[in-house]
Image (tube, helix red, strand yellow):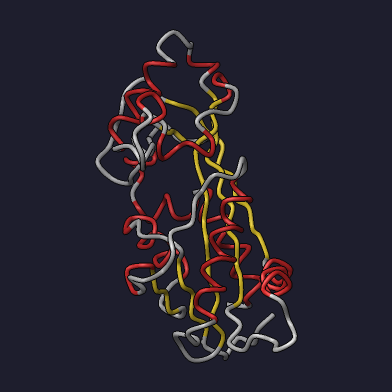
Amino acid sequence: MTQPSEPVTLVLATRNAHKAEEIRAILGAGVRCLTLADFPGAPAVAENAPTFAGNAIRKAVELARWLSARGTPGPGRTFVLADDSGLEVDALNGAPGVYSARFAALDSGAAGNSPDAANNEKLLRLLSDVPPEKRTARFRCVLALTPVMTVEPESASPVCYTDAFEIETQTFEGICEGSIDFAPRGEGGFGYDPLFVPTGFNQSFAELGEETKNRLSHRARALAALRTALRL
């Protein structure tokens, strides 16, 4: 897809500082990573698709299209990297799924994401009567990678141009299996990390530390596939 020596800039389609730091740590210093904080005028994209892949692709395509009209923000090749990820709990038929970040807010109808503590409290409440052997769950991450195209074909209609971005978009999935504990443990990580115990471990993601988590996590596994595609 691109040569190893060619500089790569990734525009991360997120304002989540924790997520951006995790991606930077996993990819290493060889990749220049920007975020939406570097582009205050970037359009907000509604994450209302029913799947992680649908939301990731929508974010990547819309932001790449917006950036293309303004020129690439770096040397070499520039891509938008959008992530949609969340927790799937078997006893809850896969919930919270795509609603992971706003799980608690679903009860009140409040706009935007819920505080991590509120999401964790709701999850524990719903699983209060579920025994250990039935608390299986997984973190799932889908990354969408869309190239920033600096020159719009003169003959292309807006619809065709959007289609071109979608055609050039690649997706990468990562899954980490585990289970949900009965109480939060650990001070690290974010989101559901204090409750999630990956298979083969006794500690939660929040207890394992960044280095270990970044080897095991759903996002790390999706990013490993992305690194291969970009020949990093």
| Residue 40 location, quadrant | bottom left
Image coords of residue 93 (percent x, y): 60, 22
Q: Is residue 50 above or below residue 104?
A: below
Of the 4 image quadrants, the one containing the C terminus is bottom right
The residue depicted at 48 percent of the width and 11 percent of the height is 131
Of the 4 image quadrants, the one containing the N terminus is bottom right
Q: Is residue 115 above or below residue 104?
A: below
Image coords of residue 104 (percent x, y): 37, 29
The residue depicted at 51 percent of the width and 56 percent of the height is 83
Q: Is residue 95 above or below residue 232?
A: above
Q: How many marks?
A: 0
| Residue 183 location, quadrant | top left
Instruction: Name the outermost residue toward the top.
Output: 129
In the depicted view, which residue is nearer to us: 121 or 56?
56
Q: Is residue 165 left or right of residue 210?
A: right
Image coords of residue 110 (percent x, y): 34, 34
Q: Is residue 74 left or right of residue 94?
A: left
In the depicted view, which residue is nearer to us: 100 or 135?
100
The residue depicted at 57 percent of the width and 73 percent of the height is 65
In the depicted view, which residue is nearer to us: 44 or 196?
44
The residue depicted at 43 percent of the width and 59 percent of the height is 44
In the depicted view, which residue is nearer to us: 53 or 21?
53
Image coords of residue 118 (percent x, y): 30, 30
| Residue 25 location, quadrant | bottom left
